[in-house]
Amino acid sequence: MIELALSWRLSERTTIMARGWESKSVEAQIEEGKERAPDHRRGSPEERVVQERLESLRLSRSRILQQLETARYPAHREMLQNGLRAIEQQIEDCHAPEIIAKESH
């Protein structure tokens, strides 16, 4: 009987420790994300919109690159490559106003 109670307490403690460890890991990831995230409060509203758009496009590009690594069928690969080209063009288009503004100064 004592062994059963002790065994139960140990498994309960392990579960609690595992959850605590997971929480700390999640907390660390959140803090790391905050440190890496650009400060969107700076700049004009238009600049913030452009930065958010660029961030979204970069994430989409990253996802497509991951999918390209595992794509097996030629038609699927072609579709992904077309999407990648379109996203890269949109990224370039987002940077174009910045380049023009710098050249005019």
Image: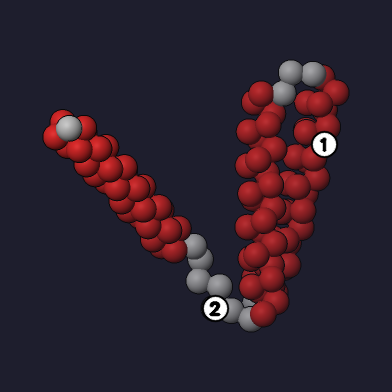
Q: Where is residue 102 in the image (x, y as percent from the top left)?
A: 64, 70
Question: What is the crowding at mark 1: few (fewer than 14 residues within 10 Å), some, or many (at least 20)?
Answer: few
User: Does residue 31 show up?
Assistant: yes
Q: Which residue is drawn at 64% across and 50% down?
A: 58
**Compared with residue 89, is residue 64 higher up or lower down, i.e. above or below?**
above
Name the residue nearer the viewer: 26 or 64: 26
- Using the image, tell me which numbered label, if any, was put on residue 82: 1
Q: In this view, does 43 lie above or below 57?
A: below
The residue beneath circle 2 is 41
**Which quadrant would residue 93 be assigned to in this image?**
bottom right
Of 42 and 59, which appears nearest the observer?
Answer: 59
Q: On the rendered image, what quadrant is the N terminus found in?
A: top left
Q: What secondary structure is found at the residue carrying circle 1?
A: helix
In the displayed structure image, the side of residue 34 where residue 20 appears, left or right:
left
Can residue 32 be spotted in the picture?
A: no
Q: Which of 99 and 42 is in front in this view?
A: 42
Q: Residue flagged by tag 2: what amino acid is it?
A: Arg
Which quadrant, please, contains the C terminus?
Answer: bottom right
Marks 2/1: CA distance? 34 Å
Q: On the rendered structure, is 3 left or right of 37? A: left
Q: Tell me the tag on residue 45.
A: none
Report the front residue among 10 and 55.
10
- Residue at x 25% of width, y 37% of height: 8
Q: Name the residue: 74% across, 18% down.
A: 72
Q: Of the residues shown, which amino acid type is indicated by label 1?
A: Asn
